[in-house]
Image: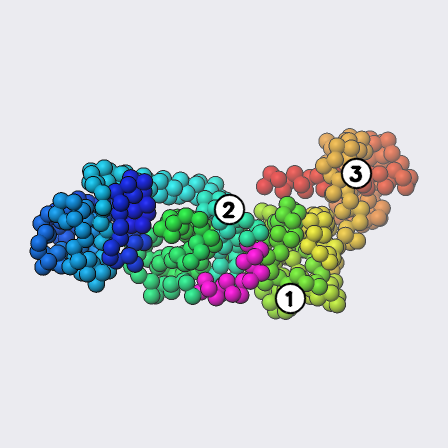
Amino acid sequence: MLTVRDVLGLDLVASFGPEAVAGAAGLDRPVRWVHVAEALDVGVMLSGGEIVLTTGLLLADDPKAQVGYVEAMHGADVAAVVLGLGRAFSTTPPTMRRAAEQRGVPLIVLHRPAPFARFTEEVNARLLNERFAAVDLSDRLRSALAALNLSGASLQGLLDEVAAFAGCPVMLVNLAQRVLATAGDRGALGELMRDWGRVSRQVAALAVPSAQAPAASPTSRAGAGATTAGPDGWIIAPLQARGTQWARLLLFGYPGTPAEGRMIADRAAEALAVHRLVGGGVHLAHDGLEGEAAQAILADLASGSVRPDQLLPRVRALGLPVNRRTFVPLIIRSLTGGGEAMDLLFRRALAEEGLAGLAGWYAADDLAVLVSLPRDQNTSTAVDRLVLKAGEHAAGRGRKFVVGAGADCATLDELPRSFAEALHVADAAMADPPAGPVARLRDVRLRGLVRLLRDEPELQAFIERELGLLFAETELLDVLRSYLRSGRNKSLAAQEHHFSRPALYRRLHSIETLLGVDLDDWDQIVSLYVAILAYDAQQTSGAGQEE
């Protein structure tokens, strides 16, 4: 909105020689409309926020009428009264000026002739343009955020869009002032996070508690309390769902007007409420924003797409210690299905073991956990205890899982490689779960290598050369697999398939004849075993993709 001061600064209005002779403290009042009126009782026709233009013809030589007129304008909550000098008054009427000063009504006199029609046309046109621009911005932001919600965008995606529209840093914090997610200029966010203790206290002081918030205006979110604007472009919006406040949205240094900033915050709050209600994804409906914030951080740490120094403020804000620590990434996969609650199990285990860490969904079927340990703590022992504790909780729900651990990392920039290692180890452990609670790279050996290379064209060609003639003979392929897996123990292989030993011998002979191999030749046996492992790895991958 334009203020009275803004109106006086317009080129056209300035050419009329405006002078604020009373009520100068109210020059920053917003202007809703410009109205020309000479009637003494015009106040009953006003709704507040108007600039009223008058020549004062009905007020000349009547001090009592002048005082009554000013009191009526004060009662109507006008933005200002503009008096055109020249027809009824050659100078400012003292009585009217004193009354305006006492009531705090800005009184502006125009020292040069002013066509009121041009005055009203200029200002009202600008007001309409401002309102149209605000409505257009509101509609564009609402449409953009609705489209993101419909496409299943992440919380980070929504905040990035809000920051782009607002042109300033954006934060989402819970009611304990813990930062859940950020968007916008990383340099500015870093400055805010480095002094977060002071910043959070200022935010808390500016925020209006929901119980004390004024009634919602027609343009605000029903029942959501007040979106407040503080100094330096700070905008604070309470986020509510089903009548309960659960977080705050913060805009820092919004460059536009406070009203526009509040509107942007309100549209963003609406979209975030929808995002929370629909769950933000298959694994997040029960998990809340803290889980999604952890997921976004883990995805960035694992991918290496964001520089570690840029991630530090977000990592610290989520409560993960980073100074003089050892980081161990874990990838967890369910063996029994229904893995949606595994993140809660691991968060509970982290708390019970007194360990610092983040847990979030890394992919559709992969839970990622990043454990932060003091440098002097034995990482293997701590991680094993964590997984055993989570396993105890999972067993009570009839669930099992495998865990792949990456290499220990001394810095955040080592994590992408270590996360890739953990993913590879977990993948291999799915086919052959480890005896201990956690699988590491040393545990998966050859099986892990072939699973890592399973999609390579050269390995696929090798499988075809070694086993291709058995693909149509599934029984013989199963017999060969059992025979090699048992260490060439014919008794165990026969028992597994419920064959007599002679029946097994006949099938092994058929395999040798069909493939042209000698099952007593170690080189050929090793080649067949590698081909079997690679073939099984490909079959597991294919089944998972189909599902």
The amino acid at mark 3 is Ala
Which residue does the numbered mark 1 point to in the structure image? 355
Foreground: disc 1 or disc 3: 1
> Which mark's residue is nearer the viewer, 2 or 3?
2
Residue 98 is inside the magenta segment: no
Q: CA distance from mark 2 to mark 3?
A: 47 Å
- Residue at 61 percent of width and 49 percent of height: 299
Residue at 70% across / 39% down in the picture?
A: 538
Amino acid carrying mark 1 in the image: Leu
Return the disc, 2 or 3, that comes first in the chain's sequence: 2
* Residue that numbered label 3 is attached to: 531
Above or below 243: residue 520: above
Quarter of the figure with residue 472? top right
Point out the tag, 1 or 3, that comes first from the N-terminus.
1
In the image, which residues are magenta?
Answer: 189-204
Report how far apart the C-alphas of labels 2 and 1 lie in the structure: 31 Å
Q: Residue furthest front?
A: 90
Q: Nearer the viewer, residue 37 or 430?
A: 37
Inspect this view and state whether residue 398 appears.
no
Query: In this picture, is 376 found above or below 328?
Result: below
* Mark 2 touches mark 1? (CB < 8 Å): no
| Secondary structure at numbered mark 1 | loop
Horizontally, residue 439 falls left or right of residue 316, namely right
Whole-percent x and y of residue 219? 31, 50
Q: How is the image coloured?
A: rainbow
Q: Do the residues under discs 1 and 3 have CB atoms within 8 angstroms?
A: no
